[in-house]
Image (spheres, rainbow, N blue to C red):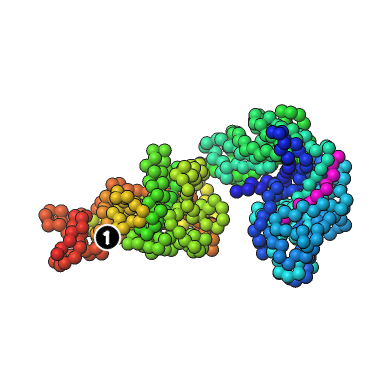
Amino acid sequence: MRKCVYLLLTLLAVYTAGNAQVTSVNLGYCDGDVSRTVHSEFCSSEKNVWVSGAIWVPASDVNVCAGNELKVIRAGLAQKISIDTMCVWVREKLDGNNLAEGGIPKADIQKGWNEITLNTPLALDGNNTTGLYIGYSYHQTSVNQGLSVFLEPTPHALYLKLGEEEWVDRSDEGLLCVEGMVYGDHLPALNLRLASIETPEYYILDKGKMRILGIVKNLGVQTVTGFDVEARIDGIDEVYTAHLDTVVDYQGIKMFDFEISPAITQVGMGRVTVTISKLNEGDDLNMEDNVASDVFETVEHDYSRMVLLEEFTTEKCSNCPRVAGFVHDILDNDAYKDAVVAVCHHAGYDTDFLTVPCDNSYLWYYNEGGSTYAPALMLDRATRSGATPVFLPNTLDQLKAMVEERLVKPALVSVKVGAEVNEETNKVKVTVNGNRAKENITVNPARITVFLVENNISPRSQAGATSDFIHQHVTRKVNSDWGEVIEWNGNDYNYECTFDLRADYVRENLQLVAMIFDYDVNDPSKNEVANAGTLFYTDFTSTGISAVQAETSTPTIYDLYGRIVTNPTKGIYIVNGQKVVVK
């Protein structure tokens, strides 16, 4: 996925004989990329109107190009249908006069990048105080969705004027694919930009460490071999410093990280600001783009995390055994012992004899019940991109990396599962209790779901499976498809539910899985699991064993619905946990 940063001054290069020769630098947000995906929300549905879009480049980025000329503007189009005129321009105000302009005829307009030479180059003297608006306009004869936009909110990156409407700043929705190309003999030499930094969402007081990740881009002609960084936290006088030796060639992007032990003593929201203070090679030409910040929340402590892995699978899916193998490899890995738990939903590619109603309910997570498939997985119901938490891992290593990513995320609620079986009534009473590290662990009221799952179930006709394939982690029952809202007692909770145990369930193969999660009824991408817990049947407790039943040598016989049968006729029954056929 393309990484968006605050304001990129991208260097375009021509490579000859193994050496790089810089021919121009670009002023823009889109890092040289153009979007060909139409977005109707940024376009006009009217006929015979002008549509305009622009970005704003701050004065510091303009002035670093002093001594050169802005000669060309590249303007992106996602669609060229019904466009009969297209022009580009540079202004100090959105509704001001053009400082420079250019255009192309209808025959030259194309989808993607359109490189348009300015009629007169704009000289950059280094004295700009207002910044520059770089934009383009086109006339549409009919409905058109031409503006090229990436859906990546970026400050000052998307100003729109649709028809007779006023200019509107919609930078909180995306960035426009337009950039100015600067040519000359004085292209900037040392100009390292701190594109972005990222801190953990939560800083845990009792751990005392904060890891800061950053991205730098070399916007200068000269290679940078290292730099100093300074980190400051609002309200704390201490400055945390680090030196990073890393080679960043021109046009290169590098990630870096360093760790600090901040003197934070109270819970609540905080902000860290990082500055690139010095380059190994000398002074940076533009210190204004060397600063970035991020917010975090401080909590006193967190809890052990258990990652919930949900698998969509059916017997009709020939590729499902392969992905089931990934899941089993994860669970069998000692590195993830007591850290990952799995639940299987037999849906997504038709259904089979193991499908229960909730399995079909969860097809909603496929982009609100859109096109479904199997095999598929959800990892803590968290989304990586798009509107769905459902994905298909390509390799075991990819899945391991995703699990590792989840395991380092702090868990702000604990999940302890208990169970008590009543042997007389064939019911299991489930208790789940724990604590939370702060009040709002989810956006919406936190919910709890409890699954009763069964392992080691023989297949009937699993497609694509070898002879030793066995169904694992099969959903048998659930307390509620969409969970129940947790009732808190301060920061503690205690939840109870009861499941009937059917006679065909093999007791020693049973397992309970509980999860606490966020639930947004309108958005599948906002249902992230806060934490999970599990308990195997070997750790259930038992009560209610009848002394009379215990003393008798006559076994109790059940039908497949779990009802006691005194005079069995022809059919299949469960005796001592085993299937028996009466002929």
**Residue 120: x, y in percent?**
88, 51
Q: Please name the residue shown 76% across and 38% down the image.
A: 22
Q: Please name the residue shown 65% across and 55% down the image.
A: 151
Quarter holding the C terminus is: bottom left
Q: Is residue 72 magenta?
A: yes
Please provide the residue range marked out in magenta.
Answer: 66-76
Establish if 563 lies above or below 385: below
- Name the chief secondary structure element in magenta: strand
Q: Is residue 172 magenta?
A: no
Q: Please name the residue shown 43% across and 50% down the image.
A: 308
Task: Using residue 536 as the reference point, say whether residue 384 is left or right of it.
Answer: right
**Residue 131: x, y in percent?**
82, 48
Q: Which amino acid does label 1 sit on?
A: Arg
Q: Which residue occupies the foreground of this view, 28 or 452? A: 28
Label 1 residue SS: loop
Q: Quadrant of residue 545?
A: bottom left
Task: Using residue 489 as the reference point, say whether residue 216 is left or right of it.
Answer: right
Q: Please name the residue shown 87% across and 45% down the image.
A: 123
Which residue matches tag 1? Answer: 502
**Residue 566: x, y in percent?**
15, 65
Q: Which residue occupies the foreground of this view, 57 or 121? A: 121
Query: Crowding at label 1, few (<14), some or many (≥20) Cα neighbours within 10 Å?
Result: some
Residue 496 visible to an observer of this rendering: no
